Image (spheres, grey):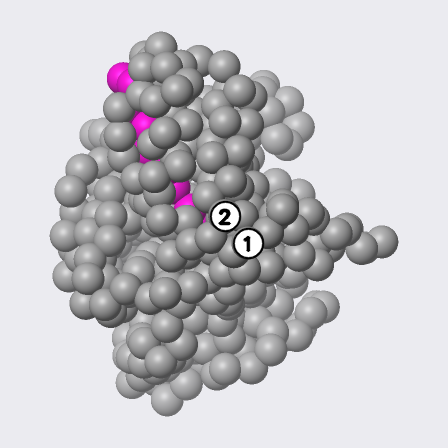
Amino acid sequence: MKKNENETETVIALCAVGAEKAVSNELRKLNLKVEDSLYGRVRFKADIKGIYQALIGLRAADRVLLETASFKAADFDALFEGASAVNWERIVPKGMGLKVAKVRTNRSLLKAETTIQAMVHKAAAQRLCGKYNMNRLPEPVITPKGENTVKTAEVRVYIEKDIVSLLVDLSGEPLFKRGYRSEGGAAPLRETTAASMLLLSGWKRKFPIYDPFCGSGTILIEAAMYAWDIAPGIGRRFAIDQMLIADEKIENAVREEFRGKININSDGSRLIRIAGSDGDLRSVSIASSNIARLRDIAEGKEPQRGIRHPDTKSLGIDLKVCSMKEAISPYTDEGYLVTNPPYGKRLGDQSMAEEIYKEMAGLQQRFPGWKIAVITDHSGFESFYGKKADSCREISNGAIPSYFYQYELQ
């Protein structure tokens, strides 16, 4: 039971708190209408083509959700009635299960999350069973490897000031899982957070970029994806594929449109200057291998696992093993330092991290005129670095509340 392909839906892009501006700007570049944004959620309008564009093309979003209903509910009767009125059969096919995966309630009379979860599931299940002449929805079947062999639609419930939003996850695996990273190193930066840093910093392809704590290469690889015009979701599938609103023809057209833009710079036709370093040889090896997997994805191949040794310099990416204190600019013009130094909570202890922040002050002399963007969980970074940032915003890296410091002029 498909809708007209040109009919618009209300869609939510979930992102890190603090990255809403980056996601909103991305949506506008995709010619999608942004309605509002708040606390890690950006609401927009899209037809089915726009939904696929968001799923495949958004760099800073963690998930894309379809808003099936929005209604006021100050008690459980109203919640059940509102959930029962949703046309779940328009989305969920016969044979698919349904799970209420998340509940969030704020400044609302309904507060008992487990009861909300049970009530919404009961309402949706009763409607679907009635439409499909079933006694109950399919239950999960878990294999010895922990895989669920029964496809399941995941629903999220957000209640804000008694207004209920019922959302169906169209992503499946979170969107930060691009497919290029088989190993992340000791404390990996989430891909969507790295993309948010790049977008918020103002970096563009024409400028050099350097990461003196490159680790497994996430910031540099996200920069390469941007510079090579690789849509982050081009190499993966989504939960929408199993739903009734899916349209394979439109999806394939969108994928081909994105794929037609890819230019991995193997012929040197673009001026791309992406560089980074790390004091750990294994981390740099992992970064090189992840770059090779990104190229696999760009060429439509299955990304190969394991350590690999590609010629990254021919692609405009310069990696080397050296400590941050030895890092120097490999370029003659000014650019952007974008980095994720060690967090005290993740690697070592806080005093060790603070000592590193002090040593980072030397970057100002070795990269004169460069702008710098730093993400860390330390609210006192500026005092150790020795300079007040031009701007600072709170942004989360997964479950870690962090701060994004930007220095416009060194």
User: Looking at the image, which is closer to me, 44 or 317?
Assistant: 44
Which circle marks residue 133 in the picture? 1
Question: Does the image show residue 107?
Answer: yes
Q: Quadrant of the N terminus?
A: bottom left
User: Looking at the image, which is closer to me, 386 or 205?
Assistant: 205
Say whether residue 164 is magenta.
yes
Residue matched to label 2? 130
Left or right: residue 40 compared with residue 96: left
Which residue is at 42% across, 64% downward? 244
Q: Is residue 162 above or below residue 98?
A: above
**Which SS does the magenta portion mostly show?**
strand
User: Looking at the image, which is closer to me, 333 or 215?
Assistant: 215
Within 10 Å of the Cα at label 2, are there few (<14), some (14-19), or many (20+) other Cα atoms? few
Q: Is residue 294 above or below residue 24?
A: below
Label 2's element? helix
- Contact, mark 1 vs mark 2 (Cβ under 8 Å): yes
Farthest residue toward the bottom? 267
Type of amino acid under label 2: Gly
What residue range appears in magenta? 160-170
Which residue is at 51% across, 75% downward? 297
Q: Is residue 70 above or below residue 320?
A: above
Left or right: residue 31 compared with residue 100: left
Q: What number of labels is visible?
A: 2
